[in-house]
Image (cartoon, rainbow, N blue to C red):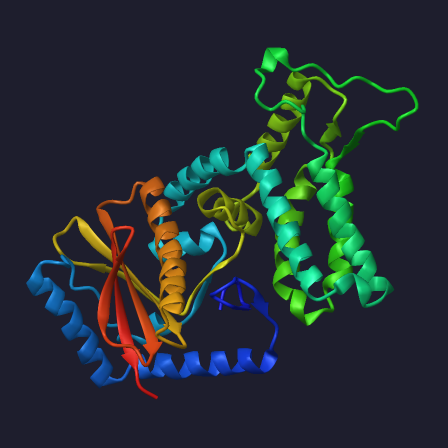
Amino acid sequence: MIDGRLVNVNDGSVIVDEYIQNKMHTLKSLVRFFVGSPSVQQKVSENVKGLLVDGKCRNPGVSFSKSSEREPMVVDSLAKVSNYLNVSAQQRKVVRFTICQQVTQHRIWRAALEEILNELKSEMDLLNYNCLGQGNNMGYQIVSSCLKFLSDMDTSSDHDSTSWMRLAPAKRVGCPPSCGDWEDVLEMFHDLIQCLKSEKWSVHHVGKLEAMKEGLSQIKDVSIDKSLGYKDVQHQENLVQKKLSNTLGHSSRCLFTLLLYYLYGHVRDIEVDIRGGIYGGGGESAFLLSMGRILTSDEEEMVWSGMKQLDKALRVFKFVWEIAGMKGVLELQGHLWCVGAMDRTLTYRGNLFFVHGISL
């Protein structure tokens, strides 16, 4: 499960099957109950303590003994991350300001919009969406129009030239004016949401469109004129960044979507099957963030995919922890519960991941 959808780990394709999705939710609920049993608690504790003896792990970690620690969580806003980390109000101001300066750059903003639309278009192509009816065809046309609008924003055909070398494009007689404003994109997003909101398969796409619509509404009065020279276009782009930085709040899903693209180059929400917590240990200045994922098999592709997804979640929390200037070092630890797996440990990007077997 990635971004609320069933995804084939081999090729990244989305599987649209409500029956399988319900089975997955049932399995994960059973595993959460299973993880809370005394025998599993003891086994997890023994596995972690074994690494303490070997010196591979400095922090004893957690066995997810509390029911609240075994709840799922969708990481989709800075507010949710800050609440989890217990970031103070003053620190949240620092976090928002610092992140906004980085993720609201025009190139990040535009690329995130294109990523969302390209993912939607790919799934539409897979479903032959534009061939299903008039309303569906309209939705497909809106996506294509949005992508063309964004692709036409290039300030110059020569991106390698320095700013003083870039000239305004020559104005051709008889051509329509190459200008507009972000309100045009906002209107297209609104119409696209109306086309898709009744479709079950598009729920996650509509959520992303709604998130970015928040940002579009803040910059709708900013013009887009491709006939201008480099400096004037740069002024327009700086204005977009300024408005987004000043208006997107700590709980903004738009801001968090931009952060995900900035960090990982994608816009998919991060899901954690077992939310875990932050635990002290290894000295007063050391803390451990521990979270878990539930997998349906021990296949190598499945395990590595689950581990990478969990690592991304853990690193978002550490990113905010460090920007907030929280006291102490935050270490990261992941737990993967896999059907039919042998207990073992893996290391990824310097972090330790425990693989726990589940026998059904």
Q: Looking at the image, which residue sits at the far right?
A: 174
Q: In which quarter of the image is residue 155?
A: top right
Q: How many marks?
A: 0
- Position of residue 203 measured from the top left corner of the image (x, y, whole percent): 64, 65
Can residue 142 be seen at all in this image of the molecule?
Answer: yes
- Position of residue 100 measured from the top left corner of the image (x, y, whole percent): 50, 37
Quarter of the image for the C terminus: give it.
bottom left
For image coordinates 22% across by 47% down, the residue present is 329
Q: Is residue 90 above or below residue 15?
A: above
- Position of residue 144 measured from the top left corner of the image (x, y, whole percent): 75, 49
Q: Looking at the image, which residue sits at the far top?
A: 164
Viewer-nearest residue: 81 or 26: 26
Q: Looking at the image, which residue sits at the far left?
A: 53
For image coordinates 63% across by 28% down, the residue present is 237
Viewer-nearest residue: 210 or 268: 268
Q: In which quarter of the image is residue 58?
A: bottom left
Q: Looking at the image, which residue sits at the far bottom?
A: 360
- Position of residue 254 measured from the top left corner of the image (x, y, whole percent): 57, 48
Viewer-nearest residue: 90 or 226: 226
Q: In this view, does 152 lie above or below 269?
A: above
In the shown orientation, is residue 67 left or right of residue 244?
A: left
For image coordinates 50% across by 83% down, the residue present is 23
Q: In this view, does 79 lie above or below 353?
A: above
For image coordinates 21% across by 46% down, the residue present is 328
In the shown orientation, is residue 221 left or right of residue 80?
A: right
Can residue 220 be seen at all in this image of the molecule?
Answer: no
